[in-house]
Amino acid sequence: MSDIIDEVISSFKVSNIFINRDYLMPDYIPEELPHREDQIRKIAGILAPLYRGERPNNIFIYGLTGTGKTAVSKFVLSNLYKKFPNKFKYVYVNTRQTDTPYRVLADLLEALGVKVPFTGLSIAELYRRLVKAIKEYSLQVVIVLDEIDAFVKKYNDDILYRLSRINSEISKGKVSFIGITNDVKFVDSLDPRVKSSLSEEEIVFPPYNAEELEDILRKRAQMALKPGVLSDSVIRLCAALAAREHGDARRALDLLRVSAEIAERLRDSTVKEEYVYMAKDEIERDRVRDIILTLPFHSKLVLAAIVAKLLEEKNAVLTTGNVYEAYLSISKKLGIEAITQRRVSDILNELDMVGLLTARVVNRGRYGKTKEISLAVDKNIIIKTLTESDNRFADLWG
Ligand SMILES: Nc1ncnc2c1ncn2[C@@H]1O[C@H](COP(=O)(O)OP(=O)(O)OP(=O)(O)O)[C@@H](O)[C@H]1O
C-alpha cells in the first residue's frame, strides 16, 4: 500500500509545469521590474541624500492596483540598503494588514528595537516613545506606509498628522515617509497640513499596457515555469485580459499562475489558452466569494432577497421598493428583526460599490425617480456562497 503514497507524493514533488511557483506569487519581488525604470530612478534620486546621512523629502506614490507601487518601493529601498547598510534604516508597514493605530506605532517602535506590550498603552504614550526612539536612533529612518487610504478611511488622519510632525518635534530631519495609495483622490481629502508635509514629492504609477504586461509575464514565467510549457499566445492572452480592465500586473500574474495550476491539475504538459479562460472564471468566483463571505449579515439578507426574487420571477424588474418587500418577506421567514428601507437602500449602494450589483437611477415620470437594480455576478455563485456562510439561507431556495 505504501507505493500508493509514494506515487501520490512523487507526482506532487515532480511538477510538469513549475520550476518554482513562488516566482508567480504576488509578494515575490523580482530582480527586474520592466517598464518601471523611470519610477525607480526618481525614487532612488529622492532617497539619495540618505547616503550623506541627510533626510530625503517625503514621497507620495499613487497609481491603480497592480501598477508596481509596492514592488518598486521595496526594490529601491532594499537595493539602497544593500549598497549602504550603515546609513539608514527602513521600515515597511502595510496599514491594511496592520490595521490599528496601536499596531502601526507598535510595529514602528519594534523595528527601531523598542519592545512594547501587545496592548495597554495609550496612543499618545506610544507616539511619545516613537519620537524618543527616533531622536535617539543613530541613523536616518525611512517609513513606508502602504495602502494608507484604507487606514485613514477606517480611522482618520490623526496618526498621519502626528507622524508628519516628528521632525519638527525633535527639531531635526531624521525621518522620511513614503506613503502609498491606489486612491488618487485620497490625498486631496487629507488635512492640508498633513498633505503638504507628506507629499513633498509625488510620483504617479500609470497602468501597464498589454505589451508591457507581456514583458513582465515573460520574465516571471522564465523563472517560474519549465521551458516549453508556455506558448506566446498564452502570455498574450493573459496580458490582454488584464489590460482590458486597467493594466494590473497582479491580475496578469494571477491569470498566468492559475492557468498553470489548472494545467498541472489536469496533468497536462502545456498551458492551453482555454485554461486561461478557466482561470479567469476561477479567480472571479474566488473574488466574489471572498466579498460575500465578509459582508455583514443584513447585507447578505438583502443579496438573498434579490436572488430569491429573481428565482421567483426570472425577468423581475428590481427596484428599491420591491427588493425591500422581498427582504421583509425573507426576514420574516427566518424570524429576524428587519431593518428600515432607508438602511436597505444604503446597503444596495454598498453592494453596488463592491461590484456585486449595479444600481441605476431611472426617472419614472410622475412616479418620480427610483433605482433599478441588477446583479453584476452569477447568481449561482451567490446562492452557493450564502448557503455556505449560513445554512439558514438554504431554506430560501428550496
Ligand atoms: N514591472 C514589473 N515587473 C515585474 N513584476 C511586476 C511589475 N510591476 C508589478 N509587478 C508584480 O505585480 C504584482 C503587483 O504589484 P504591486 O504589489 O507592486 O502593485 P501595487 O501597485 O502596490 O498594487 P496595490 O495597490 O494593489 O498594492 C506583484 O507581484 C509585483 O511583483
Image (spheres, grey):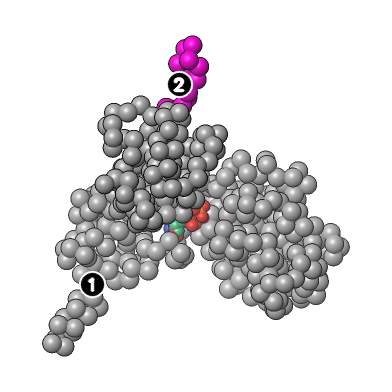
Q: Amino acid at mark 2?
A: Val
Percent x, y for residue 349?
Answer: 50, 36
Q: Is residue 357 magenta?
A: yes
Q: Could you tell me which residue is drawn at 44 percent across and 38 percent down?
A: 328
What is the number of the mark on residue 362?
A: 2
> Dot 1 corresponds to which residue?
15
Percent x, y for residue 313?
Answer: 28, 31
Give the CA distance from mark 1 to mark 2: 54 Å
Observer-nearest of 336 and 393? 336
Task: Please provide the residue range marked out in magenta.
Answer: 353-372
From what the image shows, is residue 274 above or below residue 145? above
Q: Is residue 153 left or right of residue 341?
A: right
Percent x, y for residue 185?
Answer: 61, 40
Q: Is residue 308 left or right of residue 90?
A: left
* Disc 2 CB within 8 Å of nearest ligand 1 atom: no
Q: Is residue 318 visible?
A: yes
Percent x, y for residue 17?
Answer: 23, 67
* Disc 1 CB within 8 Å of nearest ligand 1 atom: no
Q: Could you tell me which residue is drawn at 33 percent across and 68 percent down?
A: 21
SS label for mark 1: loop
Q: Is residue 130 visible?
A: no
Q: Residues within 10 Å of mark 1 (few under 14, many from 20)?
A: some
Q: Amino acid at mark 1?
A: Ser
